[in-house]
Image (tube, rainbow, N blue to C red):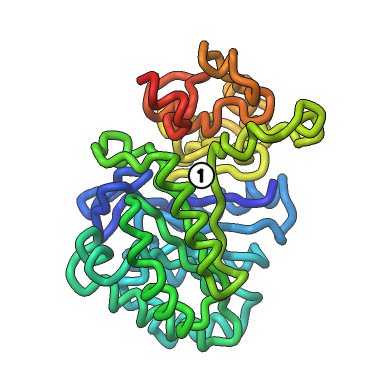
Amino acid sequence: MNQVYVLLTKGCNLKCFYCIRDYSVKNNNRVSLERLDHIFQEILNNFPPTIQLILSGGEPTILENFHEILVLASQYFENILINSNGTTNYFLTESFYSLLEQTPKIGVQISIDGDNVFHDLIRGDGSFNKSISTIEKLSRLKNCDVIISTTVTSIKFKKEFLPLQSKLIKTGFKRWNIKRVSYAGRAKDSNQYLSTENWNTLVEYIQENKLQKNILIQKQFDFKLLDTISDKQLEKINTVKNCGSGTQKIYIYPNLDVLACTCYEKLPSGNLNKSSLDEILKSKVHKSIVTDTINNKICNSCRYKLKCNGGCLGSGYSSAGMLSIADRKCPKIIDDV
């Protein structure tokens, strides 16, 4: 296990149309400090303190006691990442700066989803400048790694990339992750579908024009390349069951549900109020999710089934409400829908 996501709240000060979790400012579901202490102890009963603890939401920094939560987490873990939209004032406080001086590195991941016009269209007027300002100030701190996360929802991002790259490079970020929207949560019902062909075209453009190696993006379902590979070469490619959900990362929700992936919110592996984390990870439900094998007529006849196993099965579950459903981002699947 590499990462444990702890969702501190389902509340958020924004309402992005592609949110994988479909949360909003009206959602008051949050975890107490007492429960958090229980969660942290359960994690350390199973994994070393060097495991990456990701504090997420919703927007975690809207919580009045977020600083107390971060102090508590830093007493248990040596590798902490905070997922944030960067629009609140928490990262500008003296209490946060003081904590950074006393603890191992605390990373912050900030979402930037396009140029100022597109970003503000999704997240609200002024959001872009607030997030950029936060990134700039955090990047100047010695003990804080800043990661930028971009969720691409349209091929129009191609026009936005070069000027956005110029602006973001000046901030001094450590890494920029650019990923394709996942059709789960609020995005599940979106009528805006970014095709695999357009995504891969965008990936090629960014890879050709990026100015730094720490700008990360990759193709999906690249059948043009795969079809040029011989059967012997294909055998040498490692089999990929999934992205590591349930085996390399897990999610713990405010109600103490444990999930293999955030896409399985309606199919939790167990709950820490009823079972230990060790029992949950060994449970039949959890094992059924992490060993899920695609059963689809298109996938069953596909040359690459054993290599991709239907893509993101979490996305498949989110869209259909059952296991063994293929990822709709695969062009062979979406064309058949």
- Residue name at image x 68 percent, y 51 percent: 2
* Residue found at the very far left of the displayed protein: 125
Q: 76 above or below 96?
A: above
Residue 264 seen: no
Q: 141 above or below 203?
A: below
Query: Residue 129: x percent and y percent?
Result: 28, 78
Most foreground residue, 219 or 29: 219
- Residue name at image x 52 percent, y 82 percent: 172
Query: Residue 281: x percent and y percent?
Result: 65, 32
Residue 231 seen: yes
Task: Indicate the quadrant where residue 56 lies.
Answer: bottom left
- Residue name at image x 55 percent, y 67 percent: 215
Q: In which quarter of the image is the C terminus?
A: top left
The reply, left or right, for residue 337 in relation to residue 210 is left
The reply, left or right, for residue 181 in relation to residue 216 is left
- Residue name at image x 63 percent, y 58 percent: 52
Q: 288 above or below 253?
A: above
Most foreground residue, 44 or 192: 192
